[in-house]
Every structure is written in structure tokens, then in C-alpha cells.
Amino acid sequence: MDFGLILPELIVAGTGIAALLLDLFLAPTPERKEGTPGRGRAIASDAAAPGRGRAVAAEAGARSAPAEGVAARRAADLAGKHRAAPDPTAKRRAVGYLSLAGLVAALVFAVRLVAVAQSGPNGGAPVITGPLAGMLVVDPLAVLLKITFIAVGIGVSLLGVDFALKRGMPVGEFFALTLFAVLGMMLMAASRDLIMIYLGLETTAISCYALAGLLRGDPKSGEAALKYFLTGALASAIILFGMALVYGGTGTTNLSALPGHGAVLLGEGGLFPQAKPIALVGLVMLIAGFGFKLAAVPFHFWAPDAYEGAPTPVTAFFSIGPKAAAFAAALRIFGPVLMISGPARAGGPTSTVLALLFTILAVVTMTVGNLTALSQKNIKRMLAYSSIAHAGYLMVGFAVASPLGYAAMIYYLLAYAATNLGVFAVVIWLNNRGTGDDISDYAGLGRRAPLAALAMVICFLSLIGIPPTAGFFGKFYLFLAAIGGGMTWLAVVMVINTAISVGYYYGVVRQLYLVGAGTRSEGVAAGVSAAGVSGDGAVAVSAPGEAAPAAAPVAVPTTPVKGTPLVGLALGIAVAAILVLGFLFEPLARLAGLAGVGL
């Protein structure tokens, strides 16, 4: 077996284990308590006994002089030790730096696989031999997504170092779980077998359940972890049941063999007249299970609460990594199957039930996500619904079911990953300096943190789809795929939803630049409502015919908000990626097309 083909996965797994061991080694040991346990209580009880008070006092007085000398010497020794001891925060940073080093090394070896991806027989992917033969592949899609997932891991690690130390999160667990989740995502991207997809899916999911609850003192974090675990476990069970039914209908779990069972999976001539019901039910269950993982409507209810309650770097990871990996796995499973009789092959409207299901999911998901985001006041919940809407855009590629549609999906995944990482980098920049998660907390930040505000505007322009950002070319690519597949109406729905999304992104930009740096007027959130409810709970009742008191002005802070170097580095990389992906659209689109054709 050529271990060089899976070297990035081995490096990521090894770094995750090393991060746990290093954190265990650097963990502060509890201080040894001086004195004998219970001695104080014994003296107190003796002193309280009749006739014993004077005797205890005399005994204590007799020992007071030498005891004071010993105590002074011990205090001096402890003070010297404390002065000489290194900062525990600086030591715990070493875990984050180790994780970053491992991810960078994995990225280097993953980039080297670009030339290897077409070095196999007949210009195809090289063959992996040994125990993993037929289960993993090193094709252009796998290599491209591996690079993307490792880059996302690097970005989240940069964002998480300062955040974890400031919020008291367990540092070793955070970085180790992030690395294990990245490992699962890489396995999903390179899988050629249903069993390997499930193993990668569960590796990622179990790590994410734990990541959501790392803020142990925050009830919202525990709630997020519980909701994510319950819905994720249900989705995993549905996916596993669907895989079992597909295996029962086709007799294989190998994805490369599924298109050969087209008559069993899809039937011939219309809507599945010759297909086996057991295989059809399995495919539909797979769509439902992956719908949970993608937070597609109506399987999206867990996402807003999980995004809001989880630590912000974890929320950034949720919105990019597991979602992109789930799309990669769905592309591996459904991509070749849908192309058997998809609209691009038939030359007309959607002719299969599976493509029709994806079309309905795409339209409903993007519409519900955008409309619900308009009413959100918390920026993490708003970004959760924005993420749901973008899942709807991505599913257009499945609805079109053509190589062009799949290439557009892959490129859009790259653009979305860079853009969402940039948005959450700004949120974490401000969180680290005490700014809350309400959109109103961003008032005046255009003056207090001009670079962060400018970066957020660039990211929002990309999410909307304004040139020359990567988001514009991603949506343009999807428009072309939909029109080329005879689904112009779906492209029109995308345009309408894009226009709707401007509303909630503009709401944040308005707070950044158009709300003055002096005062703003708020109701209950400011502590004084329009009905006269004061911050201490007293209610001012207006006399009949008397106007209710106006909302009190609330001062907007004017002090600058400086970012930390690691967060600034992550934000700079994300913004640069947004612009580079836009300016280099043509070669990257060809690369995405090559990855899509490889399915």
C-alpha cells in the first residue's frame, strides 16, 4: 500500500493525538494544600468546648512566634515559585501552534497530490492497494476538497487560539476534535464506498457534537450540543438505513458500481417503472439524511440554535466544514446516479423523481432561509439562516444533474468556504474584545474597527454575489448551469432570492457605518422601553392622555476595537481568497470542471 496517497490524513490524525498528549502534559497540576486536613476544625471545636478556650489560646500563643516565621518563609518560597513559573496561557498556546503546524504540513502534502491525481492508468486516478483498495480514491475532486478542508481547519485554528484561552475552553479538546473532524471530512471527500462515507461522516459528526458543548459554563452551549447530537444521531441512523436498503437492492456498496445498476435504482422510461422499491426507498432516505446534515428545509430546525449556542469558532467550522463535506459525500453518491437520466441527458425538464426532489429542496431551502434571516436580531442566527439559504443555492447543481452543474457546485463550495470564514473572523475579532452577538452591538464599528468593518462588507458582497468577488462568479456559474440544463425558471428563483438576501446583509452594514458613534435609541434592549420600563425593573405608568416616555438614547462606544494577530491573519487570508477566487475564475472553473467530470 502506498501510504503517500493518504499521507495528509495520517498527518492530521497524528497531529490530533499529539495535541491531546501535549495538552495533558501542559495541563496545570492542582496545588498541594499545606497543613493537615481537618486540623482547623479540630482546633475550633476544642476552643468552643467549656474550659478549653483559654487553654487553646495559651497554646496558640506559645506557638505563634515560630509559626509566624514558618508561614513567612513558606510565603516567600511560594512567591518566588510564582514569579519563576511561566505563564500557563503561553504554555497552552503551544497546543494551538502544534495543530497549525500539523495542518500546514498536511496542506503541503495535499498540494503535492495535485500532480498525482491524474497519474494513474489512462490518465485517471492512481489505484490505492491494500486494505483500503476500492474504498478511497485520489482523483481531482478528492484532492481539491482535501486542500479546501485543511485550509478551513487552518483558518478555524487561527480563530480559535485566542478565543479558547479567553473563554476558558479546554484547549487540547478543541484542537484535537477540530483535527479529527477535518480527518473525517477528508475521508468523505475521497470515499468510493458507502461504508467509508459513513465512517467519515461519523468521525466528523461525533467530533462536532463535542465541539458544540465546549463552553461548559454556558447553558446555551450545552443546549446546542444536545440539539445537534439528537438531530445528528437521527440523521446518521436514517443515512445508515438508506445505505443498507441501497445495498439490498443493488448488492454492492461500491459507488463506482452504482451507475451500472441504473435499471434497479432509476428504472427505465419515466418515473421508475422498473426500479426496485427497496433501492428507491434507500435513495430517498439518503436524501433525507443528508438533508439534516446540510440543514436543508425542512430538516434545518437544529441549525439556528446550534450556531447561536456553540463557541463562535466552532460555529464558523459548522457553517463551512461539515456542510461542505456532506455536499461532497452527496455528490459522490448522487452525482453519477442523477446523470443517468437527468435533464442534461434528456434534453428537457427534470425527468426523474430524485432530481425533482432536489429541485424542490433547492427552491424551498433558499427561499425559507432568506426570508427567515430578514427578521433575525442575533448575527449568529442570521448567519445560520444565511447558511441554509446557500445550501439551497448549492443544491441547484443536483437539480440540474449535469457535469456543468457539478462543476458549479464545487466552485461555489470554494467561494462559500472563504467568504463565511471571513465573516466569522470579523465576529470573533469583535467577540475577543467584548462585543456581543446582537446586530445592534455592531453600531459604529466602521469607525472603531475600520479594517474589520471593511472586510465584513467585502464578505457580504461575496455572499450576495457582487463582482468581482468569488460569490458573484459562483452564482453566475450556477445560473449558467441551470439555463444550460433547461431550467431557466430556477435561475430566476435564484436571482429573486439573491435580491431578498440584500436586506439582512444591509442591516449589518447599516449598523457598521450609518448608526452614529454618539448615541442610538433602543427600547427594551437598552434598559428603557417605550412604556417606561427602567433598567432596574421599575415601571413608569403614564397618566391618562399623557404620551408615553420616549426611548432613552443609548451611548455607542467610541473606543477602537483592535484585533489579535492570529485573527487578523485568518481574516486577511479569507479576504485574499475571496478576491483571488474571483480574479482567477477561469482556471479555477476549469479545475472544478475537471473534478466534476471525474465523478
Image (cartoon, rainbow, N blue to C red):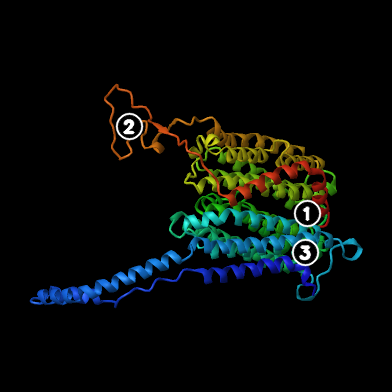
Q: Mark 3: give few (<14), some (14-19) or many (20+) Cα within 10 Å.
A: many
For marks 3 and 1, give the one nearer the viewer.
Answer: 3
Q: Mark 1 or mark 2, which is nearer the start of the sequence?
A: 1
Q: Position of residue 526 (x, y in %)?
A: 40, 36
Residue 338 is labelled as 1
Q: Position of residue 498 (x, y in %)?
A: 66, 37
Q: CA distance from mark 3 to mark 2?
A: 65 Å
The correct choice, above or below, for 519 with respect to 144 in the image is above
Q: Mark 1: give few (<14), some (14-19) or many (20+) Cα within 10 Å.
A: many
Secondary structure, mark 2, is loop
Instruction: Tell me the amino acid under the disc marked 2.
Output: Gly
Q: Residue at x 57, y 64 (%)?
A: 95
Residue 179 is labelled as none
Q: Split into 4 quadrants, where in the image is the N terminus?
A: bottom right
For marks 3 and 2, give the one nearer the viewer.
Answer: 2
Q: Position of residue 174 (x, y in %)?
A: 55, 62
Q: Looking at this view, is 109 or 146 the one in front?
A: 109
Decide if residue 327 is on the left or right side of residue 138.
left
Q: CA distance from mark 3 to mark 1?
A: 13 Å
Evaluate if marks 3 and 2 touch, with contact meaning CB atoms under 8 Å apart.
no
Residue 532 is labelled as 2
Q: Residue furthest left?
A: 51
Q: Mark 1 or mark 3, which is nearer the start of the sequence?
A: 3
Query: Pointer 3: what residue?
Result: 255
Q: Residue furthest top?
A: 545
